[in-house]
Image (cartoon, rainbow, N blue to C red):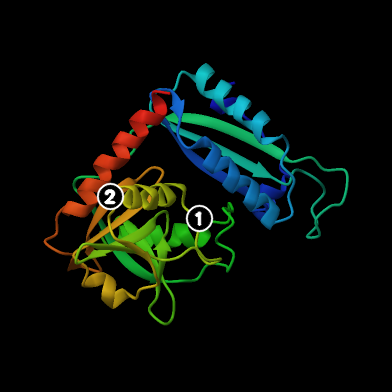
Amino acid sequence: MPLSKGRISVEDRGFQFGDGLYEVISVYAGKIFALDDHLARLQASAAGIRMKLPHTLSGLRCVLRELVRRSGTYDGILYLQLTRGACPRQHVIPRRGIRPTFLAYTRAMKTGSVRQRGLRAITVPEIRWGKCIVKSVNLLPNILARDEAVRRGADEAIFVRSDGTVVEGAATNVFIVKNGVIYTSPEQEGMLSGVTRKRVIQLARKARLKLAQVRFKVARMKKADEVFVSGTITELAPVTRIDGMRIGDGRLGSVTARLQVLFDEMVSKEVER
């Protein structure tokens, strides 16, 4: 149906409580990219908040592929959202009489538009809940952080713990490069398991680039030769300034550029299958 005709109950728990999950997935040349990875994360997120999926994973695959086919989306995104469903308002999770609400839509979009010019970022205190590994629709801290970035003339906000440890961006995962070695924080409850992040790690290892998953602090990040972020819409983009400080020479670095090429090659191979 047209997007404007979509309707959800005013008592939907996703609307009233943020009791829901979501995924944003890239569509390249009419093909859904990394669909199985996104569905696996959706399944893990659902288990993390004791929510049942409305269909099997194979059933969801069929629905989403049919949606992309019917919409005619060539390049863009596929958005899906799953909430616990609609029922009379109460904090306690209903044990019966409720069905999950599942919605999905596509939108034509050019992803990776900042890959060459890069991003400016700011650092902000980590104020999110501890289970960020669950891809929840509760995004108010991310929204406020992104808004603060824009107010300060930047594009992205990077969450930092009270001890100075870098966690991730408001909508991206963070990598730094120093002396040819790529560093990124190890997966933990306080950060999202990024699908693009996983692909970057796979590409780096396949290309025999040195990569370590270790925690690092803001001071180390700002002294890096390169900083880049990864995400579904961002793909891989260099960060040229953080809190007004220039990173490296302020341009796309050689390691980031190489990974961008490898990422493009991987996407081409997968959509040609």
Amino acid type, callout 1: Ser
View extreme (bottom): residue: 163
Q: Quadrant of residue 247?
A: bottom left
Q: Position of residue 16 (x, y in %)?
A: 68, 52
| Residue at position x 73%, y 50% in the image | 51
Q: Quadrant of residue 273?
A: top left
29 vs 10: above or below: above
Give the SS element for disc 1: loop
Disc with the residue nearer the chain's start (1 vs 2): 1
Give the SS element for disc 2: strand
Q: Position of residue 30 (x, y in %)?
A: 43, 22
Instruction: Report crowding for label 1: few under 14, some 14 to 19, many 20 or more residues within 10 A (C-alpha).
Output: some
Distance from label 1 to label 2 (Cα)? 18 Å
62 vs 231: above or below: above
Q: Quadrant of residue 220?
A: bottom left
Left or right of 245? Residue 219 is right
| Residue at position x 31%, y 66% in the image | 122
61 vs 145: above or below: above
Q: Position of residue 84 (x, y in %)?
A: 73, 47
Report which residue position mark 2 lands on.
237
Q: Quadrant of the N terminus?
A: top right
Q: Which residue is at the front of the view, 223 or 255? A: 255
Report which residue position mark 1 lands on.
193
Residue 112 visible in this rendered orientation of the protein: no
Q: Which residue is at the front of the view, 65 or 18? A: 65
Mark 1 or mark 2, whichever is nearer to me: 1
Tags 1 and 2 touching, CB below 8 Å:
no
Amino acid type, callout 2: Ala
Instruction: Report crowding for label 2: few under 14, some 14 to 19, many 20 or more residues within 10 A (C-alpha).
Output: many
| Residue at position x 21%, y 72% in the image | 223
Residue 26 visible in this rendered orientation of the protein: yes
Q: Position of residue 225 (x, y in %)?
A: 18, 65
